[in-house]
Image (cartoon, rainbow, N blue to C red):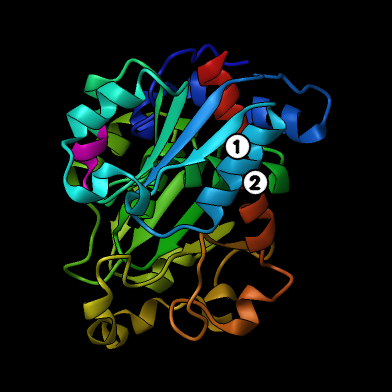
Amino acid sequence: MPPLSGRDLLSLSDLSADELTELLAFATELKSGKHHPQFPQKVLGLLFRKASTRTRVSFSVAMYQLGGQVLDLHSGVTQVGRGEPTSDTARVLDRYLDVVAIRTFDQSEIQEFADYASIPVINALTDLEHPCQILADLLTIQEEFGTLKGLTLTYLGDGNNVAHSLLLGCALVGLNVRIACPTGYAPNPTIVEQASQFGQGRSNVLVTTDPEAAVKDAQVLYTDVWASMGQEAEADDRLPIFQPYQVNESLLAKASNDAIVLHCLPAHRGEEITHEVIESSASRVWAQAENRMHAQKALLASVLG
């Protein structure tokens, strides 16, 4: 079990390369059923300001399988929805819970919660990062190819939270990462620079506006919705801008012959990815979704251990 007891995971940059590698190995071990630590009477709180399917269910099932319990603390049933300060909520929940996963908009909110709570705080998605998703992604790629080092992952679309965490995670494990985005939609330059520093001697980091060059010989093609939660009003305006970045059969043909396709879901078929590709033999989307549970189970056990 990785030595993460009591630690927060607000960003993948909170982990060292060795810790991330150990966490993925532990997830593989748990998925095999060879080892199953138990944490009876431990309680996970899910403090969610954003809608969720995979994150809510995968965290809940993972905690139940670890012998613990889950409280769903969405804003509609707590005082958070009525404006209670984050610092007050954190200091109260810190006295009730053993670990909390937070899904919200601003990274500053989850950072403030962690500043006021002593229990482990896990980023279950913010507008800046989605670290738990990338744990599952890396686990899926490792299962497929038997390694991560030296492979190339190409992400196509909006330079959003998923792109940010992919940059950091891939760089840490030695996976080359290319981000292809339209002009004006590139990822946060500070995170790109941080990933480049992490990747020195391990991973090549590239941000480009050329989707065809980005997918050339890549082993993994990855995409996400073109308008994230909170950006729905922009969705129609983005369609023509992002169309060249659609993961379709033509673009897939330019990747490596053994390339796989990933999508963090939910998918808008016919927009960022075609129905044919997501249902093709190259798709590993459903294994990727399943691995959310295994990766998060490893994370929960590690921070509770």
- Which x, y percent locates residue 114? 28, 25
**Residue 107 magenta-highlighted:** yes
Q: Residue at x 44, y 14 (%)?
A: 6
| Position in image of residue 102 (x %, y %) | 37, 40
Q: Mark number for residue 295?
A: 1
* Tag 1 near tag 2, CB within 8 Å: yes
108 inside magenta stretch: yes
Of residues 217 and 209, which is closer to you in this image?
A: 209
Instruction: Kindly identify the residue that appears in the image at 83 percent across and 24 percent down.
Output: 34
Is 264 displayed left or right of 191 in the figure? Answer: right
Pinpoint residue 170: horizontal percent, then vertical percent: 45, 41
Which of the 4 quarters of the picture holds residue 2?
top right
Q: What secondary structure predominates along the stretch shown in magenta? A: helix
Dividing the image into 4 quarters, which one contains the N terminus?
top right
Amino acid type of the residue that numbered disc 1 sits on in the rendered structure: Ala
94 shown above or below 167: above
Q: Is residue 118 visible?
A: yes
Q: Which residues are magenta?
A: 106-110
Q: Tag 2, which secondary structure?
A: helix
From the viewer's side, name the closer residue of 101 and 191: 101
User: What residue is at 73 percent from the left and 29 percent from the top?
Assistant: 30
The residue where tag 2 is placed is 291
* Residue 198, position as x, y percentages in the image: 34, 30
Label 1, secondary structure: give it.
helix
Which of the two residues, 24 or 154, is positioned nearer the viewer here?
Answer: 24
* Residue furthest right as drawn: 34
Q: Label 1, label 2: how many angstroms apart (C-alpha)?
A: 6 Å
